[in-house]
Image: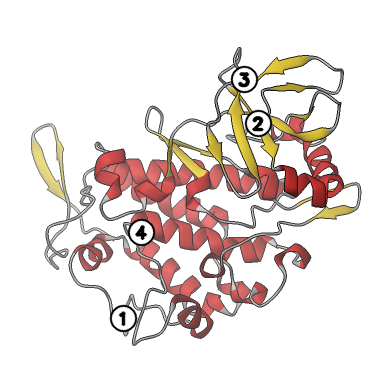
Amino acid sequence: MRTTMVKDSLGNKKQLADMLAQGGEGSVYPLTDRSDILVKVYHADKLAAMSDRYQRKIDAMISKKDKLAKLNLCWPLLSVFDENQRWIGYAMRKGQGVPMSYLAHALAYQKHFPNLNRVAIVQYLLSYLDTIEQLHYKGVMVGDYNLQNFLCDETNHTVSLIDCDSYQVSVDAKHYPCPVGSPDLTPIEHHGKDFSQVMRTVESELFSVAIVLFQCLMLGRHPYDVIGGEDRVSNMKQGNFAYGIGGRGIPKGAWYNIWSHMPSLLKGMFIQVFREGSTDVRNRPSIRDWKKALGIYLNELNKGWHNTEIKPAKPKDDAYKGQRSIEGQSLSRTSV
């Protein structure tokens, strides 16, 4: 029997609308009188096994809500209880947009982002990096980098982060880890370990962030996609990144063309992080580095110095210099 009504800590009742989404941990419902507010109700079996653990972490996260209020996050705002005043979940604001996984996809972007171009992608990524940077500054680590949980809003090209209850936080000297993660989006220093026992760091986060940036710019291609018969995780452990001078196995067609048109600064950063940075945290560019490089790229895209197409029809010609028009005059500049 599903929950239809919840209470806050003071006993105030709120009615739930029809279920919006369901995952492995719980179900999400809008409020009938506030569609901008969602309630996550944990599944009964999860509550029976780990109710105290869930509640302690959510209460710790709620204590940080004021410091994160201005960020594009669906952060826990208050705890909710059933009719017997038993803790069952939490309330959060509703995020707006389409999952980033559809943007980072060779076909799905056409349906879900019909007006997408390179300018918009870079704007999304800059918004995303702003939020990640602020989270790190406030001691919060995402941990589980899942593109389904990053929403892209076409109205303003911003990104909201949802499903935040898995994030790693520390409050009053108490550490609450991120218990989940995907190996192909996690740096190798955390592989083979129980994620619930792992302490994520800014350096480990930077590796995951770089993979997200690459996938968005490369239509979903993973930086360690199969090369010479190896799987992603094996390639990651060996730093087998196919792109750049001396790279092996760059996919032909759209991905080859996209890489060809990417600015040299971004190419160099990707080569650095996915080769040396796979094992050496010192070779992982910072959020500030990525924001600076993408800011330059956006500025040059807006000036017409780079191809804005999602799928360029052909690789960049060595003679291509980019075109812009000022007062009717066509000027050229060698693109980076």
Q: How much space separates mark 3 and mark 1, taking CA atoms?
A: 54 Å
* Residue drawn at the location 67% of the way across and 32% of the way down: 1
Distance between the Cα atoms at labels 4 and 2?
Answer: 37 Å
Q: In the rendered image, which residue does mark 1 sit on? A: 245
Question: Considering only vertical position in the picture, is 181 above or below 147?
Answer: below
Q: Name the N-terminal-most of marks 2 and 1.
A: 2
Q: Quadrant of residue 286?
A: bottom right
- For the residue labelled by badge 4, is the local secondary structure a helix, a strand or a loop? loop
Judged from the image, the secondary structure of the residue bearing numbered disc 1 is loop
Q: What's under tag 3, amino acid-wise?
A: Leu
The residue identified by callout 4 is 220
Task: From the image, tell me which residue sits under label 2.
Answer: 2
Which one is in front in this view, the residue at disc 1 or the one at disc 4? Answer: 4
- What is the distance, in whole Å, between disc 1 and disc 4 at their CAs? 22 Å
Residue under label 3, please give it. Answer: 31
Of the image marks 4 and 2, the number of the one nearer the N terminus: 2
The residue shown at (25%, 61%) is 258
* Dot 2 amino acid type: Arg
Task: Give the CA separation, mark 2 to mark 1.
Answer: 57 Å
